[in-house]
Each structure stands twice: as structure tokens, then as C-alpha cells.
Amino acid sequence: MIENAKLDHIGLATSGAKEAADWYLNVLKFHLKGKFVNCNNGMDVYFVANEDESVVYEIYTEKDLAPEVRGKIDHISFVSEDIEKDYAFAVAQGYEICTDGIEGIASFWESGIRYFKLKTASGEEVEFCQRL
């Protein structure tokens, strides 16, 4: 069992991350929690949150995004306290892993992150993310 599944963020794939982030900042008065560069494509990634940070969006640009999926939720991410244990559980349960095992992004947050994504029984992608 994956324990303590607290919501970390909701991933939002867009064709223009800055414009989408600005909308949340200006219309809903969210604040900028973090801004990073995606090491895979060099594009900016914005983390925006409401006042009490109970809702956090990771907003990023996908280059060849089909118009019908632009702005749709890409994934929901939960906090992992032990990424190795959670990954081993997911593999043992036979879940379809959507990432290349446990992946990492060294430039996110203070010391980087490690994460993996899996598909649920209904097909959506769920991410488990551990900040380092």
C-alpha cells in the first residue's frame, strides 16, 4: 500500500505555460510557488498555488499538443515519503508504469525530485513525487 497519499500538485499541459500561469496569478490571485526550466525541452515550468497552497498546479508547455487536449489535466501528483518503496509496491501490483522507472529532475525545488507515474484502473496517470 502507498501510504500518506497527500496531494502534491495537478499537472496541466498547455501550448503556452506563461499565459496559462498568468491567468491563475491574475484571475484567481494564485501566487508563484516556483519556476523552473524543463531539462527535456528547455521550456519554463510554473508551479502556482492558491493562498493556503491546498491547490497547486504544475503548468508546462507541450510542443506538439493536439488542440483537443490543450489545457486538460495531464496528471495528478501525490507526495511520496519513500519513492523506492512506493515504486516497488506499484510494480509488485502490476500497475502500468508510464515513466522510465523512477526518474529525476535535479533542477526542481531546492535539491531536485524523484518521481514515477502509473496508470490507474480507469486510465488516468497518477504521479508519486518525492522532493530531495
Image (cartoon, rainbow, N blue to C red):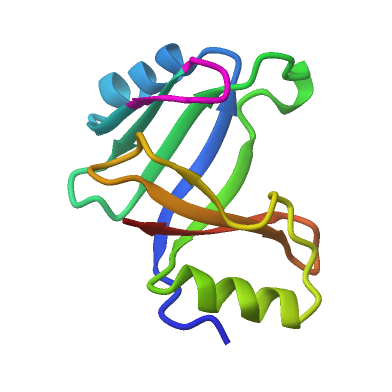
Is 43 situated left or right of 1 in this image?
A: left
**Which image quadrant is residue 101 in?**
bottom right
Instruction: Give x and y (percent) for residue 109.
Output: 28, 41
Which residue shows up at 72% across the image and 55% down it?
124
Is 65 situated left or right of 103 in this image?
A: right
Relative vertical location of residue 123 with respect to residue 46 in this rendering, above or below? below
Which residue shows up at 52% across the image and 72% down it?
84
Which residue shows up at 73% across the image and 28% down it?
69
Instruction: Give x and y (percent) for residue 52.
Output: 19, 52
Which residue shows up at 38% across the image and 22% down it?
21
Is 14 situated left or right of 30 in this image?
A: right
Is 104 in front, or is 60?
104
Instruction: Give x and y (percent) for residue 108.
Output: 35, 38
Where does the C terminus fall, quadrant-wise?
Answer: bottom left
Q: Check the image and name the residue furthest to the bottom.
A: 1
Relative vertical location of residue 10 with respect to residue 82 in this rendering, above or below? above
Is 118 in front, or is 121?
118
**Which image quadrant is residue 91 in?**
bottom right
Instruction: Give x and y (percent) for residue 110.
Output: 22, 43
Relative vertical location of residue 43 with respect to residue 39 in this rendering, above or below? above
Q: How many marks?
A: 0
Is 12 situated left or right of 6 in this image?
A: right
Q: Is residue 79 magenta?
A: no
Q: Main secondary structure of the magenta part?
A: loop
Q: Is residue 40 magenta?
A: yes
Query: Magenta part of the protein: which range?
Result: 36-43
Where does the N terminus fall, quadrant-wise?
Answer: bottom right
